[in-house]
């Protein structure tokens, strides 16, 4: 006889994962947490990160996309540089009036005692990597190349309201954040209903929409040598 899911399983809330600090420093832990989410399952990413390695950014985004995770990305503070790619993979994105997202060209520095041939090869690879990652980010976010290029070059801190106004996220009043998540699925559904009601009444959301996948101390940059700067 087919086993029916128990009430406890159906009432479990989405797994919550903190994307806080340098992503490269926590890549192993973040990868394990994402892999703990069942295929096609729900999870919520709370993001306050200055970035990390470009390879780490692509890896985390790929895991979210390939496992078909129904991820919600909430920018609680900063989502800059490499942290933008995992956010882009989220099916639902939420920002507040105080969120900030830094877009900028990739930066890199060579290691000491690098031979000329190796430096030339790295320069070739770097140029290709930068172009491909920018294209990928645009597709995953669903933003036009024109707007993305304006943000990336020479670099721009995009506010939460501006990001939402571009149709890339929901802008949420921080005083209403208590409705985003509840202990159980039933309460979570009730919270979603309250969110919908708030949206219709114009009390919670401003200039945003749910968009499918397809301190500011020293800015941390994606180092093309695979390290954060």
Image (cartoon, grey):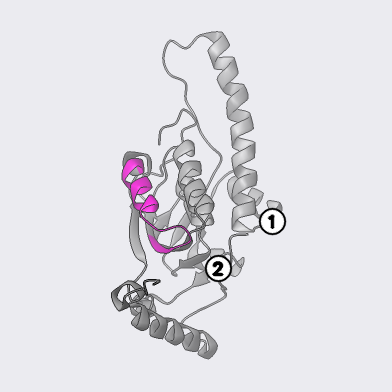
Q: Disc 1 vs disc 2: Cβ atoms closer than 8 Å? A: no
In the image, residue 75 sits, relative to residue 30, either above or below, namely below
Please give the name of the residue rendered at 29% of the width and 75% of the height, measured from the top-left corner. Answer: 8
In this view of the protein, can residue 183 be seen by the observer? no
Q: Earlier in the sequence, mark 1 or mark 2?
A: 1
Q: Position of residue 221 (x, y in %)?
A: 45, 40
Q: Is 28 covered by the magenta stretch?
A: yes
Quadrant of the image containing the N terminus: bottom left
Task: Give the residue number, with chain letter if any, for mark 2.
Answer: 164
Measured as percent of width and height from the top left, residue 166 is found at 61, 65
What is the magenta range?
27-45
**Residue 168 position within the rendered picture, expressed as x and y whole percent measured from the top left:** 58, 64
Query: Quadrant of the rendered structure where residue 142 is?
Result: bottom right
Local crowd at mark 1 within 10 Å, few (<14), some, or many (≥20)? few
Q: Nearer the viewer, residue 3 or 141?
A: 3
Q: Position of residue 39 (x, y in %)?
A: 46, 57
Q: Residue at x 64, y 52 (%)?
A: 139
Neighbourhood count class around disc 2 (C-alpha, 10 Å): few under 14, some 14–19, many 20 upward: many
Residue 162 drawn in magenta: no
Note whether 147 is above or below 9 in the view shown: above
The residue tagged 1 is: 144
Q: Nearer the viewer, residue 1 or 173?
A: 1
Looking at the image, residue 172 lies above or below residue 91 = below
The quarter of the image holding the C terminus is top left
Say which mark, if any, is on residue 226: none
Q: Secondary structure at mark 2?
A: helix
Which SS class for mark 1?
loop
Q: Residue at x 51, y 9 (%)?
A: 115
> For residue 212, which quarter of the picture?
bottom right
């Amino acid at each position: 006889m087919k086993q029916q899911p128990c009430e406890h399983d159906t009432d479990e809330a989405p797994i919550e994962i903190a994307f806080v600090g340098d992503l490269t420093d926590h890549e192993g832990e973040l990868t394990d947490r994402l892999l703990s989410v069942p295929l096609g399952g729900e999870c919520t990413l709370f993001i306050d990160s200055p970035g990390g390695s470009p390879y780490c950014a692509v890896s985390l985004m790929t895991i979210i996309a390939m496992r078909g995770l129904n991820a919600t990305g909430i920018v609680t503070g900063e989502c800059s540089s490499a942290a933008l790619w995992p956010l882009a993979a989220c099916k639902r994105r939420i920002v507040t009036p105080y969120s900030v997202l830094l877009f900028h060209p990739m930066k890199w520095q060579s290691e000491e005692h690098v031979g000329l041939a190796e430096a030339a090869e790295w320069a070739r690879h770097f140029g290709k990597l930068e172009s491909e990652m920018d294209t990928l980010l645009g597709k995953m976010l669903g933003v036009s190349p024109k707007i993305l290029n304006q943000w990336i070059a020479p670099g721009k801190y995009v506010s939460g309201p501006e990001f939402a106004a571009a149709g890339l996220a929901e802008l949420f009043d921080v005083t209403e954040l208590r409705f985003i998540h509840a202990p159980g699925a039933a309460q979570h559904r009730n919270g979603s209903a309250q969110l919908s009601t708030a949206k219709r009444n114009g009390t919670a959301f401003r200039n945003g929409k749910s968009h499918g996948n397809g301190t500011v101390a020293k800015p941390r940059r994606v180092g093309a040598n695979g390290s954060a700067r």
